């Protein structure tokens, strides 16, 4: 009996340590992504990230293998949050009109309020053409975004459409209007909504 209890305690302690590690990584990532989104991938090293995020290099290297591991984790966490925001916008909506308005508004909000963080995603995606180590994270994120678009199409009553093709269309629109927002175009969020409505309009 004592052996069973000891085994349970070991498992419980291991779960606690694992949870604490995840929480620590998430906290570091939340600080690091602010620095990364301002400077971009190529212009930052671990020392820059540590300095700008108010953490030591030792703290970063304790929880992350290297710069690529840290950046991959940061972008994964952030884009997962974005996917949850879009899913939340869809939930609780009734008609197709309500779903469209909620989702396009969520996309518009993203480029109005989180443009620099989304810019980091496009930076990392481009860097993955050269950095093989970044490719698994990029592929995972793109798979999640495509799945999100498929859920969106299903809510609009269009479950048989090519989700990947629609993802590419929406991603292109998002990137173009994100760039406009970064350059100071205050109409970019509303222009993105209008463009999404045009692309997603049902065929006559």
Image: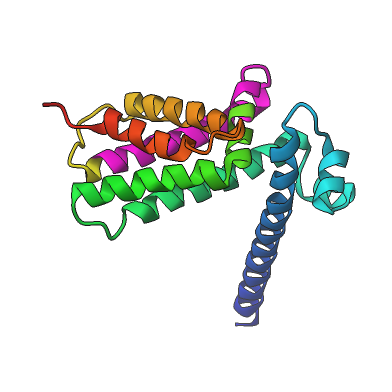
Quarter of the figure with residue 159? top left
- Asked whether residue 19 is drawn in magenta, I would say no
Residue found at the far left of this picture: 204
Q: Residue furthest top?
A: 130
Q: Kindly identify the residue that appears in the image at 35 percent across and 30 percent down.
A: 195
User: Depth check: 29 or 2 in front?
Assistant: 29
Q: Is residue 173 left or right of residue 74?
A: left
Which residue in the rendered view is the most extreme toward the bottom? 1
Query: Looking at the image, which is closer to me, 163 or 51?
Result: 51
Q: In the image, 185: left or right of 98?
A: right
Number of marks present in the image shown = 0
Magenta stretch: give its range.
124-153
Q: Is residue 65 above or below residue 166?
A: below
Quarter of the picture containing the N terminus is bottom right
Q: Nearer the viewer, residue 11 or 162?
A: 162
Question: Going 65% across and 75% down the picture, which residue do you hit?
Answer: 9
Q: Residue at x 44, y 43 (%)?
A: 108
Q: Main secondary structure of the magenta part?
A: helix
In the rendering, at what x and y percent does residue 117 appear?
62, 41
Q: Nearer the viewer, residue 194 or 10?
A: 194
Position of residue 88 measured from the top left corner of the image (x, y, whole percent)? 38, 56
Quadrant location of the C terminus in the rendered image:
top left
């Amino acid at each position: 009996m004592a052996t069973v209890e000891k085994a349970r305690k070991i498992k419980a302690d291991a779960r606690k340590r694992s949870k604490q590690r995840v929480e620590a990584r998430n906290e570091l990532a939340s600080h690091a992504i602010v620095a990364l989104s301002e400077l971009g991938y190529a212009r930052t090293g671990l020392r820059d990230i540590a300095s700008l995020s108010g953490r030591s290099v030792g703290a970063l290297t304790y929880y992350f293998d290297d710069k690529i591991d840290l950046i991959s984790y940061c972008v994964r966490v952030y884009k997962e949050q974005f996917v949850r925001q879009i899913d939340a916008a869809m939930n609780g909506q009734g008609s197709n009109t309500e779903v469209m308005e909620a989702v396009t508004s969520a996309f518009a909000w993203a480029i109005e309020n989180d443009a620099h963080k989304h810019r980091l995603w496009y930076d990392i995606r481009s860097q993955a053409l050269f950095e093989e180590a970044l490719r698994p994270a990029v592929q995972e994120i793109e798979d999640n975004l495509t799945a999100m678009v498929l859920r969106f199409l299903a809510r609009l009553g269009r479950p048989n459409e090519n989700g990947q093709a629609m993802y590419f269309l929406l991603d292109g629109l998002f990137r173009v209007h994100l760039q406009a927002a970064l350059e100071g175009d205050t109409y970019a969020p509303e222009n993105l909504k209008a463009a999404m409505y045009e692309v997603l309009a049902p065929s006559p």
